[in-house]
Image (tube, grey):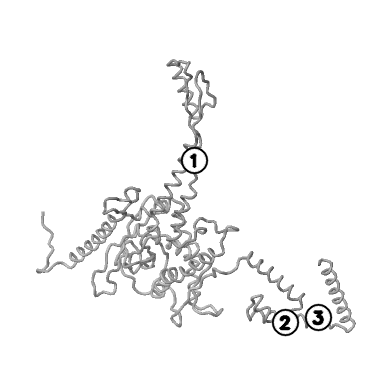
């Protein structure tokens, strides 16, 4: 066999050096993870391995996280709850604050109507959280065949589709290893596994980084790979499976008591009788018989032992809530109706608002918009700036608005009937007691002036009648008050 030449003119082939550097980089990452994994759970001078004793896996992969997400309710809630809250309601990209629609805003809406950005971004958010990164593949009009994905993007392009992938199906195949390059340590190409709709077949695309938006959540030292959202709580999720699965098995075995057969000391069973009793018991256990014909034998039920798993599960949920920042009520789905805690809800909405500002907008939305502007998919804003507008998380619901209106109506009734206008002017009452802003107060005053202008003038005789009615009403109230006293 002819040996492969690794030198050209006395120097190492640059491609060979780069390939070796890639392999060294990959092996060093694998070695570092393996070293860390072997140290987990060790105590008593490494004589006790807690992870091994409790059945915890040391080295977790994408497949572990994905399987946990798809099969376990608690794991799915940890991933889905923040994503659903972050992307709820409408969001848009605006160039100007006024009502006039710009060319940039119009182009964004047309593209959004076609590609449904919010649905794709929320999927990308989920996939990013399951693994250590996610990507958004940009389907541009210059790709005519699979090989074209490997070419850098040039010139103005049209965006035909976008496809989110997790790190399990979008492997980094080549890294930038030159320290002098601005992309040093960043991916150069990806191997993306694309499956058909039925999932019966797949193909691998080798894709250039310019056609990919790389998304990382909760990175530490590595800006390419973050921390999977299930990693820190993976052991707790396994504990929940043990507790709930064990309690279900315990109920299955314990809810239907076992029986103990006692033979009368003065009775002797023949072998045919023993065989017949065994057959009857087998039929009883298999729900084929509900009555036993016994002679000289009594059946005593054994004591049932079924314990509630509630407290054991609750402590696991509490630990998960502590790590993830998701309130326990939100995590368990009891945030609706009367079970809702006002403090939990307020803290949760504040957490979601921060997540929008620190992750969803700067890591997902803006890199996508910037790339669309760079490739001419969207026109460049006139001032070079744009804003991402989210639906207000703290806006009151219809029920909350009705309750606030009822409280304000009661306060207004007390204000009028007690003649408090001599102490607090109407404008001050509306602002400091009813919570209206200056614009609302101005609108109310304009409405009052309009109503007064339309009302007919009151004659002196009518004024006297109204004053007498008011005097009689006050006298009646005073009499009723004396009777009650």
Name which residue lies at 55% across and 59% down. 335
Where 2 sits versus 412, above or below? Answer: above
Label 3: how many Cα within 10 Å (few below 14, some 14–19, many 20+): few
Residue to which mark 3 is pinned: 455
- Residue 450, how many percent across, how many down? 74, 81
Circle 3: element type? loop
Determine whether the residue tagged by mark 2 lies in a helix, strand or loop: loop
Location of mark 1 (residue): 306
Q: CA distance from mark 2 to mark 1?
A: 68 Å
Residue 374: quarter of image: bottom left
Indicate the quadrant where residue 217 lies.
Answer: bottom left
The residue beneath circle 2 is 423
The residue shown at (54%, 65%) is: 343
Q: Position of residue 472 (x, y in %)?
A: 87, 74
Placement of the C terminus among the 4 image quadrants: bottom right
Count of labels in the image: 3
């Amino acid at each position: 066999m002819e040996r492969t030449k690794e030198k050209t003119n006395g120097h190492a082939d640059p491609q060979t050096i780069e390939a070796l550097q890639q392999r060294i980089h990959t092996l060093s990452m694998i070695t570092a993870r393996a070293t860390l994994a072997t140290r987990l759970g060790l105590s008593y001078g490494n004589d006790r391995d807690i992870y091994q004793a409790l059945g915890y896996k040391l080295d977790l992969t994408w497949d572990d996280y994905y399987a946990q997400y798809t099969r376990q309710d608690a794991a799915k809630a940890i991933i889905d709850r923040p994503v659903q809250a972050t992307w709820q309601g409408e969001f848009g990209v605006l160039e100007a604050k006024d009502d006039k629609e710009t060319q940039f805003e119009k182009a964004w809406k047309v593209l959004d109507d076609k590609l449904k950005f919010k649905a794709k971004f929320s999927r990308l958010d989920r996939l990013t959280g399951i693994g250590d990164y996610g990507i958004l593949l940009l389907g541009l009009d210059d790709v005519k065949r699979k090989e074209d994905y490997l070419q850098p993007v040039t010139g103005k392009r049209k965006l035909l589709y976008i496809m989110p992938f997790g790190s399990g199906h979008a492997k980094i195949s080549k890294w930038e290893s030159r320290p002098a390059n601005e992309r040093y340590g960043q991916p150069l190409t990806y191997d993306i596994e694309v499956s058909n709709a039925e999932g019966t077949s797949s193909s691998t695309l080798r894709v250039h980084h310019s056609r990919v938006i790389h998304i990382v959540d909760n990175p530490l030292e590595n800006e390419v790979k973050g921390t999977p959202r299930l990693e820190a709580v993976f052991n707790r999720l396994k504990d929940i499976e043990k507790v709930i699965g064990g309690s279900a098995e315990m109920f299955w075995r314990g809810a239907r008591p076992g029986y103990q057969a006692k033979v009368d000391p003065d009775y002797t069973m023949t072998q045919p009788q023993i065989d017949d009793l065994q057959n009857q018991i087998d039929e009883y256990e298999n729900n084929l018989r509900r009555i036993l014909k016994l002679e000289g034998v009594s059946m005593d039920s054994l004591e049932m032992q079924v314990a509630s798993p509630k407290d054991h599960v609750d402590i696991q949920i509490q630990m998960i809530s502590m790590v993830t920042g998701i309130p326990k009520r939100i995590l368990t789905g009891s945030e609706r109706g009367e079970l809702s805690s006002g403090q939990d809800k307020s803290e949760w909405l504040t957490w979601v608002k921060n997540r929008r500002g620190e992750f969803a907008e700067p890591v997902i939305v803006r890199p996508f918009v910037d790339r669309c502007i760079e490739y001419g998919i969207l026109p460049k804003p006139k001032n070079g700036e744009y804003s991402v507008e989210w639906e207000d998380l703290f806006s009151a619901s219809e029920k909350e608005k009705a309750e606030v209106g009822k409280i304000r109506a009661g306060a207004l009734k007390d204000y009028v009937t007690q003649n408090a206008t001599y102490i607090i002017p109407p404008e001050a009452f509306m602002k400091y007691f009813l919570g209206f802003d200056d614009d609302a107060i101005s609108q109310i005053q304009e409405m009052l002036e309009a109503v007064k202008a339309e009302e007919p003038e009151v004659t002196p005789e009518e004024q006297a009648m109204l004053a007498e009615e008011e005097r009689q009403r006050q006298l009646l109230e005073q009499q009723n008050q004396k009777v009650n006293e």
